[in-house]
Image (tube, helix red, strand yellow):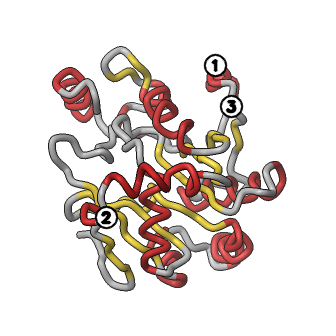
Amino acid sequence: MPRESGACSIRLSAIGDDWIARSSRAMTAGVLGLVLAGGLARRMGGGDKPLKTIGGVTILDRVLSRLVPQCTSVIINANGDPARFAATGLPVIADDVPDFAGPLAGILAGLDWAVAHVPNVAFVASAPGDCPFLPRDLVARLHQARQQANLPLACARSGEWRHPVVALWPVALRNDLRAAVTAEGLRKIEVWTARHGVALADWPVTPVDPFFNVNTPEDAAEADRIAAQHPEA
């Protein structure tokens, strides 16, 4: 079950879409988008989940169509041969923590890349490469939740489910995260984020859960059905 302790839930619907529209440009300035595409996809029989097609479009293309307009630049975190993502024209970075250390290693790689290549960026917005229906206001709402709660981190929630890898990460916490991952061997996102404070940004699950993710062939079939019935999703 999702954990609520140490988190501040921000009910965004009361703020209204007008605030989002007026603030989106200011909030997304200086944000690096990070697509986490390094999973092993065991339940899908291996391969790259982001390259699976939903409604005739790869999940990765769907993710990028939502994330690119919300960020100043976007990179992909993936291990193995980066050439398989060459068609995107985006930088592909690997974990520098060995043995598939999980999503925190991908987050750390993104924060390191930001410092080295886009030093003006203060935040990294992460999203998994297997979520084909990401919201168009993701980054602005994460920023809004963080600012309203006066906390450094924010992650998404839909219904009762938290999505720890759909989150906003301050570059200033990069060294702390590296120590946690490498010295402590920490692998659980929510253990680390609870140390610093994480706000929750809420989305409804109807008509489409924007954080529906494709983990199995059955999920892929359901995503195809959703895409056909809700082409705007």
Tell me if residue 47 can be seen: no
Q: Mark 1 or mark 2: name the one nearer the start of the chain.
A: 2
Which of the 4 quarters of the picture holds residue 166? Answer: bottom left
Q: Name the residue carrying label 1.
A: 87
Viewer-closest of 60 and 145? 145
Q: Residues within 10 Å of mark 3 (few under 14, many from 20)?
A: few
Up/down of 100 relative to 185, above or below: above
Q: Residue at 47%, 46% (x, y): give it.
A: 128
Disc 3 marks which amino acid? Leu
On residue 149, the disc is none
Q: Nearer the viewer, mark 2 or mark 3?
A: 2
Which of the 4 quarters of the picture holds residue 94? Answer: top right
Up/down of 153 relative to 92, above or below: below
Alpha carbon distance from label 3 to label 1: 8 Å
Side (left or right) of 159 relative to 132: left
Q: Residues within 10 Å of mark 1 (few under 14, many from 20)?
A: few
Side (left or right) of 13 relative to 181: left
Q: Residues within 10 Å of mark 2 (few under 14, many from 20)?
A: few
Q: Name the residue carrying label 3.
A: 90
Disc 2 marks which amino acid? Ile
Q: Position of residue 184 (x, y in %)?
A: 64, 79
Up/down of 109 relative to 40, above or below: below
Q: Name the residue carrying label 2.
A: 15
